[in-house]
Image (cartoon, rainbow, N blue to C red):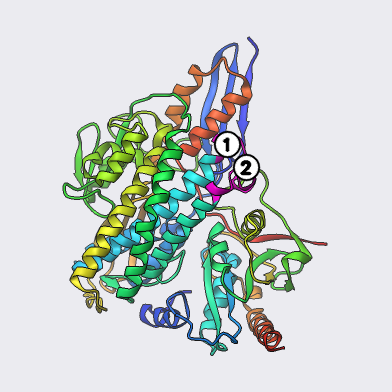
Amino acid sequence: MISEPQRTQRAELSSASFAVSATSSRTMRVAVIGLGNPLRGDDGIGPRVVAELHRRELPEGVEAIDGGTGGLDLLRLMEGWDRVIVVDAAEIGREPGAFARFTPEEVRLRLHEGDLSLHNAGLPEALALASALNHPLPPITLFGVQPKRIGWEAGLSPVVERTIPALVEAILDEVSEAAKSAKG
Amino acid sequence: MSGKKIEVHHVTRVEGHGNIVVDIKNGEIKECRFEVVEAPRFFEAFVRGRPYYELSHITSRICGICAVGHATTSLRATEKAFSVELSEQAWLLRKLNFHGEMIDSHVLHTYYLVAPDFFGVHSVIPLVETHREVVERALRIKKLSGDLCAMIGGRHTHPIALTVGGFTHTPTERELREIQERLIAARADMDVTVDLFATLPWPEFERETEYVSLHKDDEYAFIDGTIVTSDGFSYPIEDYKKVTNEHCVPFSTAKWTKHNRDSYMVGALARLNNNFDQLHPRAKEAAKKLGLKPLVTNPFLNTAAQVVEMVHCVEDSIRIIDELLTRGIKPEEPPVVEVKAGEGVGACEVPRGVLFHHYVYDEEGRCTEANCIIPTNQNMANLNADMQALVPQILDRPQEEIRHLLEMLVRAYDPCISCSTHFLTVEFV
């Protein structure tokens, strides 16, 4: 999950929040935001994918961001990009390890029952608040991964771990599609 | 008189799962308690066997709101175990990062979680319709505090640049100046925030308890210091167990604590009561407007104390940046850590109160034992005692009103019972 400090941190530093993108106005700015807690079993899929992306050479203008369990702060993370891709564990009614690509418009994201709290606030609540405020957000694509186990443990279950190469490829395809649509 | 039974399963707008149970028959209280039903989290087990440099990163995932608090407390424990000294610049940056998170957490609690109670709405989202400017202001302050944290910690939520002995990244002079300008501009938002919360009709309820916090003579203590209590006790941080005295109660999965009385309170109100003299003059002014003068014994006013602390943190951040700029900010390599067998205790005043991390390391720098005592646990017995004192005073009110007041009381403590997962439930249409 966490390797030697210097190496991880340097890798993060080169791509994460410090980086001031020196990209031209024509370059599509895309954020891939991984959500979840690496200490909660398969909920850690988002940060795990982000770590995987940090090992790759990402196209100019693309950043992979570990959103952790940011709650309503997601709003802030999603602002200011041309496109946002969110990776999160999701109950999609499929077999563990399967993933689905969808947009917020295509699905109903269940808001947490009753009143809003911050710890159970997540993407659905952040989108609801943005919509109430008329805050413009970039187009969002979600990759939801069906978890096998969500509980207090570090590391993904093997079946979810095995899905990572295909998932990363699908995300990179999405990124290049986004880049193409910018030129077109 | 007929009976009243109030059972609130999973109180909302608090972090995690807690239940209120009140049973009143013929004017007599049969049951009255706050249950914590959250599953234990075993963080102590997570870190056992891990190398020292991972611990702050693992424990920062305990909480999505006070991640900097956990990381900083964890680092202090490790730094003490290995006798690592921080440079003056590293100290200033630690404090600045801490202030950022304090503002961030307090604005969440005061505006998003508590304010809806006074505006008659169930959450911040419908508040947009009636009080758009209030929500916009909250978001603006949050953005500033988040950007401040990201400038130092490397990302908004779980800091990555904090490491044993210092930082792996240093903000630039330009970044510091920009944030400072925004902090100075945020004074206006702070003034309006104080005025807003000064008008709120806080429930009337007094119950004196023991207030426990860290203390330093020369500054409002957030990182390190000594443990003090309003009953006149004082302990070095290493003696934290003399204060916390953890014990189990049958209806709570969270351990309770007690010191000189049956319970004690930690958090913004405890800090304000114990450390009023060390507040920034502008924060003292804010306290005056909000009617806070130690000893404040109304627990509902914990939220008002958080407003005072926001003002303090904005002002002290401006001062710290001045100091960093005067000294000249420059990248520094963290000191080389000389690993040895030993132990260390870190203590910080995180948004919800004093937090302790205690680690034992073997000669290879692997953690063999860990103990984390979080503020919410320390407040549980006190919250319960408040409920038991409050209910007899409001027995004649309608059941719905009793329920709402008890929920507000729970929320005043800003409890952070758990960090839940954020996985989505998706319905395809």
Chain under numbered label 1: B
Callouts 1 and 2 close, C-beta under 8 Å: yes
Q: Position of residue A62 (x, y in %)?
A: 56, 82
- Which residue corresponds to the image point at 56% horizontal and 57% vertical from the top-left? A72
Q: Quadrant of residue B89?
A: bottom left
Q: Amino acid at mark 2?
A: Thr
Residue B174 makes an appearance in the image: yes
Q: Looking at the picture, does residue A86 appear above or below residue B371?
A: below
Residue range of the region highlighted in magenta in the rendering: B116-135
Q: Position of residue B196 (x, y in %)?
A: 46, 39
Q: Position of residue B398 (x, y in %)?
A: 62, 19
For this rendering, which residue is in front, B319 or A53?
B319
For this rendering, which residue is in front, B283 or B231?
B283
Q: Earlier in the sequence, mark 1 or mark 2?
A: 1
**Image quadrant where one finds the C terminus of chain B:** bottom right
- Which residue corresponds to the image point at 61% horizontal and 48% vertical from the top-left? B128
Residue B54 is inside the magenta segment: no
Q: Disc 2 marks which residue?
A: B130
Q: Disc 1 marks which residue?
A: B119
Instruction: Please rate how many residues cluster around mark 1, counting C-alpha atoms within 10 Å: few if below 14, some from 14 to 19, many from 20.
Output: some
Q: Amino acid at mark 1?
A: Phe
